Image (tube, rainbow, N blue to C red):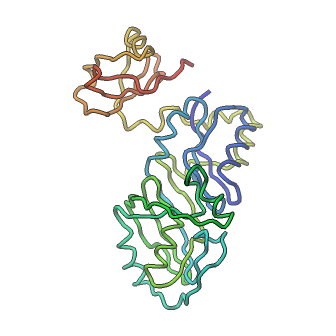
Amino acid sequence: MAGFLNMNKEPGWTSTDVVRKVKGLVGVKKLGHGGTLDPIAVGVLPLCIGQATRFADSILFGTKAYRMTVTLGAATDTFDSSGRMVARADPLGVGKDAVVQALEAFRGTITQIPPMYSAVKHKGQRLYDLARAGVVVERKSRQVAVERLSLTRWDPPEFDLEVECGHGFYARTLANDLGEALGSAAHLSSLQRTRAGRFRIEDSFTVGQLERAVEEGVWRDLLFPVDWTLYHLRAVVLDPLMQEFCQHGRALGLSTLGPAKPGEQARAYNRGGEMIALLEFDPGRGGWRPDKVLAPS
């Protein structure tokens, strides 16, 4: 059994809570998620089952979209509403035009410092464990891509933003940094992930809906195929001899794929339409070589 479940995480659950619950519901051992959501956050949480876990990176490092609510007037140690207030400011001193102007600096490639309350590791320890122990350490800044950022609701002291971003982006950090850029204070008060790669909120379902599908014996109908996140790659069908070469890690002479750049990837299928491998072009090692080979179903 392999594929993806597009879960709609509800508030109060951790991503690990959802994984643990779904494991028990569907009775699988190998199951992971495609990108952590904080307990206060809701929305798209793709789960990878079986051999689909080998393609979790195609979600983790893909683009994501969020709807976020920022509250002016207070900053917290966690940068969101779950934390302890560490600064106050008069929210009436910030106008809509000032927010619109400040957003300009947060588009494109920007720099963020991961919050102390995050899963990033420092010398083998999670930052949130250090933070809970009252320890604050220096963190390295990271470059993240913000492809789209727009103000969608203005209702002071709150306002809503829609964001499309790349890997490593922290909505909480954006809220905190935006407050500082405005000469005020702010924190993230709600967050919904509306898309993670090809997985959309419109196609997701809650744990309760999955429970009902399991009771009715139809939960497998909710699975997305193991190659769902790879449809943007070229595809090739291998004959039995090429399939054997592939399964033994040998280079494949695939002229049917045409010219390719080093590091380019492609999907390989058997004649029955089953994906059997993810290939990568390596001209220094004979051309197309299997990068990830899937066990036959």
- The residue most toward the top is 241
Q: Which quadrant is home to the N terminus?
A: top right
Nearest the viewer among 47 and 14 is 14
Residue 26: x and y in percent read: 71, 35
Nearest the viewer among 128 and 209 is 128
Q: Which quadrant is home to the C terminus?
A: top right
Residue 267: x and y in percent read: 40, 28
Residue 105 in the figure: left or right of residue 37: left
Query: Looking at the image, how many numbered discs can be counted on the residues?
Result: 0
Vertical position of residue 191 compared to residue 96: above or below: above
Residue at 67%, 74% (x, y): give it: 84
Residue at 41%, 9% (x, y): give it: 240
Vertical position of residue 250 compared to residue 200: above or below: above
- The residue most toward the right is 215
Residue 135 in the figure: left or right of residue 106: right
Residue 138: x and y in percent read: 51, 64
Residue 57 in the figure: left or right of residue 204: left
Vertical position of residue 91 compared to residue 261: above or below: below
Residue 25: x and y in percent read: 74, 38
Residue at 57%, 84% (x, y): give it: 73
Residue at 43%, 62% (x, y): give it: 141
